[in-house]
């Protein structure tokens, strides 16, 4: 599963700021459009936008694959984060694939890959988007949501934004057109070069 994911999306797509290490990808602004300047409204806006986009992307997928990536010399160092994930009502499946390595910045980087029913995704999105806003339960692991056969990977990095990458340019272009008002203005000129005028 890990080799297939790295081959389909590139290993760089499971790192940080993947918009800047890919071509033909999208970057969304999530919480900045909140109607009220409060953590709750920012969280609600981010969760709604992320859910809407991913429901459209994975509309025909009954299951999605997840990758958690995090630093540390052992899983025990991150025990508190696994407890947070459990507090979300989510149990990491027993069938999972683990990979550890030293990254380019000489940090020990760990990966856990597994597949879930799409109906479980909302729990993980809650925890991922809540972290920077101080809302609990939440976790700081980097999270990637993908479907190898579909050829699309999403990286909601926190309440501020989400990147969407992959070889399926048809779906990416469709999302680009449909959700253009949520695209990050700062990177819009680059996205226009890839996908055309809106």
Image (tube, rainbow, N blue to C red):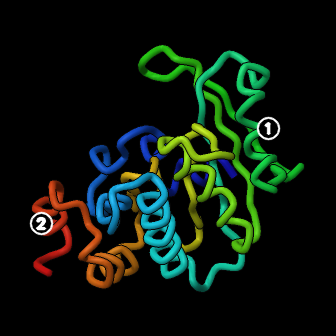
Mark number displayed over residue 13: none
Query: Up-down: is 149 above or below 86?
Result: below
Residue beneath the point at 43% across and 62% down: 41
Residue beneath the point at 59% across and 25% down: 71
Mark number displayed over residue 83: 1
Q: Position of 172 compared to 75: left or right?
A: left
x and y percentages locating residue 126 in the rendered image: 61, 57
Query: Up-down: is 165 above or below 67?
Result: below
The image quarter in which residue 139 lies: top right
Q: Position of 76 compared to 62: left or right?
A: right
The image quarter in which residue 35 lies: bottom left
Viewer-side residue, 186 vs 169: 186
Q: Is residue 25 visible?
A: no
x and y percentages locating residue 147 in the rendered image: 59, 67
x and y percentages locating residue 82 in the rendered image: 76, 37
Q: Is residue 40 visible?
A: yes
Q: Position of 41 compared to 93: left or right?
A: left
Q: How far apart, in angstroms, are the residues tagged by discs 1 and 2? A: 43 Å
Question: Which element carries disc 1, helix, strand or loop?
Answer: helix
Mark number displayed over residue 193: 2
Viewer-side residue, 53 vs 10: 53
Viewer-side residue, 4 vs 60: 60
Image marks 1 and 2: residues in contact by CB distance under 8 Å: no
- Disc 1 versus disc 2: nearer the observer: 1
Residue beneath the point at 70% across and 41% down: 112
Of mark 1 and mark 2, the one earlier in the sequence is 1
């Amino acid at each position: 599963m890990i080799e297939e994911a790295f081959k389909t999306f590139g290993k760089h797509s499971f790192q940080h700021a993947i918009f800047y290490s890919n071509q033909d990808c999208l970057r969304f602004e999530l919480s900045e459009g909140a109607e009220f300047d409060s953590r709750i409204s920012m969280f609600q806006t981010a969760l709604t936008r992320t859910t809407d986009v991913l429901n459209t992307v994975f509309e025909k997928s009954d299951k999605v694959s997840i990758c958690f990536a995090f630093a540390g010399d052992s899983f025990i160092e991150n025990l508190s984060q696994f407890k947070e994930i459990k507090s979300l009502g989510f149990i990491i499946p027993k069938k999972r694939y683990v990979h550890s390595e030293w990254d380019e910045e000489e940090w020990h980087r760990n990966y856990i890959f597994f597949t879930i029913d799409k109906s479980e995704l909302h729990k993980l999105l809650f925890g991922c988007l809540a972290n920077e806003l101080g809302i609990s339960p939440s976790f700081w692991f980097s999270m990637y949501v993908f479907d190898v056969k579909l050829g699309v990977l999403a990286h909601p990095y926190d309440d501020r934004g989400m990147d969407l990458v992959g070889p399926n340019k048809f779906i990416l272009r469709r999302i680009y057109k449909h959700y253009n008002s949520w695209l990050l203005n700062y990177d819009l000129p680059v996205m226009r070069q890839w996908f055309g005028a809106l």
